[in-house]
Image: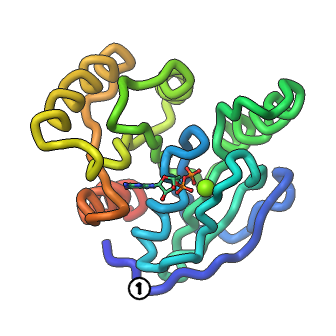
Amino acid sequence: MKIKTVTFIKSAAALHQIPPENYPHVAFAGRSNVGKSSLLNTLFNRKKLVLVSSTPGKTRLLNFFLVNEKIYFVDLPGYGYARVPHKMQAQWQRLIESYILKSEQLRCVVVLTDIRHDIQRSDLQLIEWLALNEIDMIVVGTKADKLSKNKLNAQLAQNRQQLAKAGVTAITPFSAVTGVGKNELLNSIDVFVSD
Ligand SMILES: Nc1nc2c(ncn2[C@@H]2O[C@H](COP(=O)(O)OP(=O)(O)O)[C@@H](O)[C@H]2O)c(=O)[nH]1
Ligand SMILES: [Mg+2]
């Protein structure tokens, strides 16, 4: 798919604030600082539509971007902030979980992991939870430009092994700096939103 237009529509702090139109949704999830805002800006061909935050944990809302006037890209709050109180974490988690489980518009969740490392426990928890609930997902390894080709391939093999245990067969390397993986990701998304 090609992204021709994108408009920020609104932020939702509760399920009843989610835009009501009957458009398919694609949600983006990842730990804080994984590069989610940068990835979205890259997909959108916009430098600053999505705030690249130097203060992890600031976005606590579901942000809705209308793409090509017919698909919602949903920027979910990042998870795993060290500095956020447990109670708040639980509250965000409830909102995200109920959105993912209850939304009739959600077609798939794009899960972002940092390609420089093994897949973290919190990432695996999310991936296993999505698999358990039969939610389709696309796993992306961000910041691919930060590894040499050899290291990237080694880490991809390692990550694929980890993901296989959760029944996931693919991970797409992505870089907001070089644009690698952009078209592949958009094509994967297209499979879920066009029917
Ligand atoms: N080298 C490199 N840095 C990135 C990439 N994506 C994000 N970053 C950097 O990682 C930090 C966090 O990025 P951000 O998009 O705000 O992450 P978010 O918290 O998941 O939304 C910022 O300093 C970005 O410039 C990437 O693909 N390559
Ligand atoms: Mg962000």
Which residue corresponds to the image point at 75% horizontal and 33% vertical from the top-left?
93
**Compared to 141, does 58 lie above or below?**
below
Report x, y in % for residue 27.
55, 52
Q: Quadrant of the C terminus?
A: bottom left
Tag 1, which secondary structure?
loop
Q: Which amino acid does label 1 sit on?
A: Lys
Return the residue found at the far top.
165
**Compared to 9, does 59 lie above or below?**
above
Q: Which of 37 and 165 is in front in this view?
A: 37
Q: Mark 1 points at which residue?
A: 4
Report x, y in % for residue 9.
70, 76
Q: Which of 93 and 56 is in front in this view?
A: 56
**Compared to 186, does 192 lie above or below?**
above
Query: Which quarter of the frame holds ligand 2?
Result: bottom right
Report x, y in % for residue 150.
10, 36
**Compared to 53, does 125 lie above or below?**
above
